[in-house]
Image (cartoon, rainbow, N blue to C red):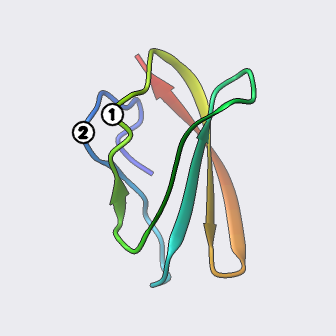
Amino acid sequence: MYPNPFGGGKLYIVSGQVGVKDIMIINILGEVVFQNSTYEDYVLPNNLKSGIYIVKIKEGGRQGLSRLVVP
């Protein structure tokens, strides 16, 4: 996932698989602030305020978590 720190625009999701990606961005309070399903390699989460987020990505039978910093 890049760019990280994220300043706006496109957030790219690097994946070795082709298929639908379910992307959820969660703030430190556990609230879902962005959710999207896409076949693209990027999403446009433009409403993020400064802080640290957890990005949950599901693709096929796989799932992963990453930390995202928004300055």
Residue 9: assigned label: 2
Q: In the picture, residue 9 is in which quadrant?
A: top left
Residue at x 35% of width, y 41% of height: 3
- Residue 37 x/y as whole percent: 49, 64
Residue at x 28% of width, y 32% of height: 8
Q: Is residue 55 above or below residue 41?
A: above
Name the residue tied to disc 1.
46
Q: Nearer the viewer, residue 27 or 68?
A: 27
Q: Is residue 4 left or right of residue 8?
A: right
Q: Amino acid at mark 1?
A: Asn
The C terminus: image quadrant:
top left
Per the image, label 1 sits on a secondary structure element best described as loop
Residue at x 43% of width, y 26% of height: 48
Residue 16: assigned label: none
Query: Mark 1 or mark 2, which is nearer the start of the sequence?
Result: 2
Q: Is residue 31 above or below residue 45?
A: above
Q: Is residue 15 above or below residue 12?
A: below
- Residue 14 x/y as whole percent: 43, 64
Q: Do the CB atoms of the residues marked 2 and 1 lie less than 8 Å apart?
A: yes
User: Which residue is farthest bottom?
Assistant: 18
Per the image, label 2 sits on a secondary structure element best described as loop
